[in-house]
Image (spheres, grey):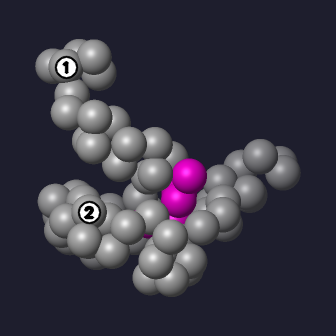
Amino acid sequence: MSKDKLHPTVTRFREFINQHPKLRKEIRRTGRSWQEYYEKWILLGEEDEFWDKFKGESSEFKNKTEN
């Protein structure tokens, strides 16, 4: 399925994930589902303090760009 055919909220969630790289890392580390975080994003909204801990670059990304 191409990006053009995704539901607009899914597209916005993908953009949100790109702005919160620690969230992507957390999902992969814990094995939790993307669906779980998508539902939280829908219910809580982007500005909820729950997401604050996932903002910014992950340390892994910083290390790769600094070397």
**Residue displayed at 20% across by 33% down:** 7
Q: Earlier in the sequence, mark 2 or mark 1?
A: 1
Residue 12 vs 36, above or below: the answer is above
Q: Nearer the viewer, residue 43 or 31?
A: 43
| Residue 6 location (% of width, % of height) | 21, 28
Q: Which residue is mark 1?
A: 5
The amino acid type found where label 2 is placed reads Ile
Q: Please identify the quadrant where the N terminus is shown.
A: top left
| Residue 35 location (% of width, % of height) | 16, 59
Residue 19 vs 42, above or below: the answer is above
**Residue displayed at 19% across by 65% down:** 39
Q: Residues within 10 Å of mark 1 (few under 14, many from 20)?
A: few
**Residue displayed at 84% across by 51% down:** 66
Q: Nearer the viewer, residue 56 or 15?
A: 15
Residue 25 vs 66, above or below: the answer is below
> What span is in magenta?
19-23
| Residue 8 location (% of width, % of height) | 28, 34
Q: Is residue 27 visible?
A: no
Q: Is residue 3 magenta?
A: no
Which image quadrant is residue 12 in? Answer: top left
Task: Name the mark on residue 42.
Answer: 2
Which image quadrant is residue 23 in? Answer: bottom left
The amino acid type found where label 1 is placed reads Lys
**Residue displayed at 45% across by 64% down:** 46
Secondary element under disc 2, as helix, strand or loop, is: helix
- Residue 33 as seen in the image, left or right of residue 57: left
Q: Residues within 10 Å of mark 2 (few under 14, many from 20)?
A: few
Q: Main secondary structure of the magenta part?
A: helix
Q: Is residue 23 visible?
A: yes
